[in-house]
Amino acid sequence: MNIVIDKNNKTLENPAKEIVYKTNELNLWYGENHALKNINLDIYENEVTAIIGPSGCGKSTYIKTLNRMIELIPIVKTSGEISYRGRNIFEKSYTVEELRTKVGMVFQKPNPFPKSIYENVAYGPKIHGIRDKKVLDEVVEKSLKGAAIWDEVKDRLHQNAYGLSGGQQQRLCIARCLAIEPDVILMDEPTSALDPISTLKVEELVQELKKNFSIIIVTHNMQQAARISDKTAFFLNGEVVEFDQTNKIFSTPSDKRTEDYITGRFG
Amino acid sequence: MKLIDHSKVVKNMAPRLLWNQVFKVIFFIATLFGLFVLGILLYRIFTQGSGYLSLDFLQNLPSRKPERAGIKTALIGTVWLVGVVAPVSLLIGVGTALYLEEYAKKSRFTDFIQVNISNLAGVPSIVFGLLGLTLFVRAFALGTSVLAAGLTMSLLVLPVIIVASQEAIRAVPNELREASFGMGATKWQTIIRVVLPAAIPGILTGGILALSRAIGETAPLVVLGLPLFIAFLPKTVFDTFTVLPMQIYNWTSRPQEEFHALAAAGIIILLVMLIIMNSIAVLIRNKFQKRY
């Protein structure tokens, strides 16, 4: 027990870290299906928070709730509260456009637009009314560098993004996400469609990005969660079974179900 | 270090959201426009024609006296016409689409066919009437029969059915074909068990639009020389006949006011028939869509 207290104290050691997302008694239904049950989670600034769990446990649903993408499905109903930087995102006056300007998202499959590499990255700033060509050029370069893909594409910025490999496309999508200079980056299984080398590159990138962004990443790959995250939440059947420091979850989980899952006994 | 001026982003938020709303309203008005016109049309027709709607109107043969005139020959004639057009145009149309999409290799020749099919869709219907007159009525000596008119109408709607079916077949994901071929299925087995069931909703949508057009077309039938006044029903596809739009055309061209009202009543019957056909298509489509 002493160890547990010590590890818990670690969070307290760093009181400067602010809470970005505070989820309070969140419930979500797909029609009759109760998909998320009484979720309570705090997500801290400049950390990588991993969400793990078997298929259908609600982890993707949860991450899509954080930028309200889940509302694209018409039958979804929610209750409870998620506050982002102290403001409830379900508030009527809080528009999704405003929220998503601050919370970027990277999807499971690379989804670049059928435009040039440059246009892909410049899309975000452009829709937000940034027209100054010099600023756009700078933003594109900085974002592509930030996504560790600049050296590979700097000579072909105006070629179609579909000519890139899958791993490059995914890093381009991360660059596109960085271009609006968000506060939080949501990643929904960003490496599940990538080969091991591309996966490694994205993982290294995540480590780099957390200096400037708060990252929430859904992953099927437990080694990945263990490698790159600071905190890990284990979801099962729409509930958070355990949420703690990653090294504690993977060394001395306090719940039997977490232990069974991470040791591969089920799921 | 931030490159983007975020105060500008915040400032731009309000106009962006405003434009978002503006376009929503514009598109809603565009939708209302169509509804409005349809509403006026329906109102005009119903106020004019509803007085003449009765069971007698459906059961009576045409007559020179408006109070005794009915629409039976035209109504039955339209059913006969659909009976010829639907099987002929769907079989040939879907067959052509399947050949072009699934079998034919892309070549100059198939490109040529493709361009011509699209062009045919734009040819005025009266030209198809002339074609039918020379080919079916005269050369094949079918006269002004159900068969001659049905084949002419089939030619008219074929391009539409082919293009719609091609679109539907193309929209079936290649993964499904791969899955079937991967099990050792032949091309025909893949088409009949996987491709067609997945494409049927789209094919039916195009088919029903085409049939609705065949029901409503008048010009090619006038060219074929279909009788405007006929007091008996066809017994085989080789008999002469008339259809709803011909009957409506006939009545509207008469000077008496009563016949104009009869024409409005005829239009109501034609609209009802179209609605019934579209509903059946929607039902069939829903049935097929549930499987996937």
Image (cartoon, coloured by chain):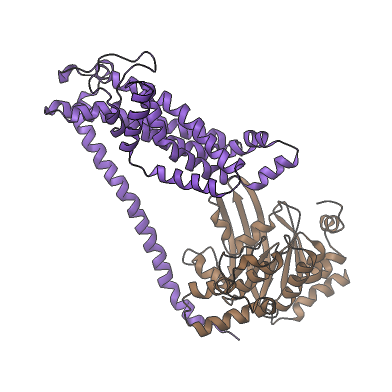
**Is there any visible trace of residue A230 in the rendered image?**
no
**Is there any visible trace of residue A202 in the rendered image?**
yes
Q: Along the line of sight, which residue is nearer the eye, B198 or B94?
A: B94
Residue B189 lies, in percent from the top left, at 67, 33
Q: Along the line of sight, which residue is nearer the eye, A75 or A224?
A: A224
Instruction: Say if A145 sits above or below B157 in the image.
Output: below
Q: Colour of chain B?
A: purple
Q: Colour of chain A?
A: brown
Instruction: Say if B217 sits above or below A143 in the image.
Output: above
Instruction: Say if B77 sits above or below B268 in the image.
Output: above
Residue B278 lies, in percent from the top left, at 42, 33
Residue B124 lies, in percent from the top left, at 33, 41
Quarter holding the N terminus of chain A is: bottom right
Side of B149 relative to A20 (left or right): left
Quarter occupied by residue A243: bottom right
At horizontal 52% and vertical 85% (from top left) the residue drawn is: A134
At horizontal 36% and vertical 35% (from top left) the residue drawn is: B213
Count of all numbered marks drawn on residues in the image: 0
Instruction: Say if B93 sits above or below A228 in the image.
Output: above
Side of A254 relative to B152 (left or right): right
Q: Along the line of sight, which residue is nearer the eye, A230 or A239?
A: A230
Specify the farthest residue to the front.
Answer: B139
Residue B227 lies, in percent from the top left, at 25, 22
Quarter occupied by residue B259: top left
Side of A156 relative to A51 (left or right): left
Side of B287 relative to B120 (left or right): right
